[in-house]
Amino acid sequence: MKLKKFPRHSIDFTWRDFLTVLWAAAGGCFAQSRRVQDFEKDFAKMVGVPYAIAIPSCRFGIYHYLKFLDPGHGDEVILPAFTFPAVPAAVRASGMVPVFVDSLSGGFNVDVQRLTEEIRPKTRAILVSHLFGTGCDMERVLEAARAGGLKVIEDCAHATGSVFEKRRAGSWGDVGFFSFGIGKNLSTFGGGMMTTACPETYEHFRCLMAALPETGIPTVIKSAVIARIKAALTNQPGFSFITFPIVRLLAFHDVNWLDRAMVEQFPSDLADETVEFLDDIQGARRYSAPQAALGMRKLSVLDHVNESQAAKAEYYDRKLSPALQFRSSAVGRTGEALSYYVLKSRNRNQLRASLLTYGIDTKACDMANCWPECPISQQLESDLFEIPLSRWMTPADLEYVTRSINEAYERALG
């Protein structure tokens, strides 16, 4: 058995990142400081829009933008059924009605043709997600939106730095929202960014941020310490010698136990969901200067990181069994921002359990089917899982993981 084990996801938070945060925290320059403003300007330039403003979270931004639209009774937002549950929770909490659309057959982004068929007199906005860094068909979305006078919201939580049709994610719609949570390709252990070309939208969010309480130094340092511990436990050698034995033990009876323990849970009752969501939003604080200092450092190498991840993903595309993949390897990964690499299997649990014997940890996808009448999205929720994709994986690591997955898949079939 190979001594080195492979984590489902490696947290990218180095000692240099940690020291960057501590240095900025020691300076005491927080929230609406020059450091945050510089990060916002650099981010807007990267995306290719006039305005960007740092926000507490992606869900915070979606909720407040929908409130900014001043929705009337019964106003609707069209969105993917296959998404993170916080997204429809934000729609419902804003007072608007989510209208769900199934995923495209053979993919995981929304079926734009079905989306256009759901536009009705009460529709106010279209919300699209660029899942796993792969761009949605924005030209068709914008065409449908313009015809109906609708706003377009881009959920770019998985797509920081993604380029498709020669434009960055977050530059297509009326507004884009990004996530900088732990595990993302640009992570500042929380927070996010709003991008827009609309000065009124920017001014609204600027006033919102100014009204939020500042994030204190102890909170920032605590978050940085937690992020550093998680990084140590999800990278080498900590993962191989500490974390993986625990993962194997927890997965002995149920390979999904750890997934359920780690994923954010949402109440099944919609009224309770709204109360819990609003409590979370009301506890939001301003994006801090130490986070911005870290964000600027990571932004300076973002394209390099994305290119490196895309090259690894292209290797998987070429070498993994086509039966486990969504698309031909001929499509390529140019321009994609990849924090995750996902596969599909009707025997997902059996395959994941088998991969643990090879020293490979995997994860059921966090995305969920949020509407029962969407069969493709339901199948995606049941079949998708993430495999290791880290900027520190070597060619030998990629070869071992690929060969092991193919072997385990053949064993599952046989």
Image: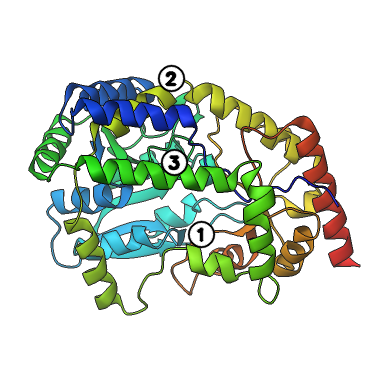
Which numbered tag is attached to residue 140?
3
**Pointer 3 with pointer 2, Cβ within 8 A:** no
Q: Position of residue 1 (x, y in %)?
A: 86, 52
Q: How far, Cα to Cα, is label 1 from label 2?
A: 28 Å
- Kindly report the distance in space between the C-alpha atoms of the residues bearing marks 1 and 3: 27 Å
For marks 1 and 2, the one nearer the N-term is 2
Is any atom of residue 287 visible in this view?
Answer: yes
Residue drawn at x 28%, y 47% as measured from the top left: 148
Real-space Cα distance between discs 3 and 2? 32 Å
Closer to us: mark 1 or mark 2? 2
Q: In the image, residue 128 lies at what x, y percent?
A: 40, 48
Secondary structure beneath dot 1 equals loop
Question: Compared to 55, does 19 lie above or below?
Answer: above
Q: Earlier in the sequence, mark 1 or mark 3?
A: 3
Q: Is residue 224 left or right of residue 74?
A: right
Residue at mark 2:
300
Q: Quadrant of the C terminus?
A: bottom right
* Residue type of the residue flagged with mark 2: Ser
Report the front residue among 73 and 237. Answer: 237
- Given the image, on which type of amino acid does mark 3 rest? Arg
Residue topped by disc 1: 366
Q: Nearer the viewer, mark 3 or mark 2?
A: 2
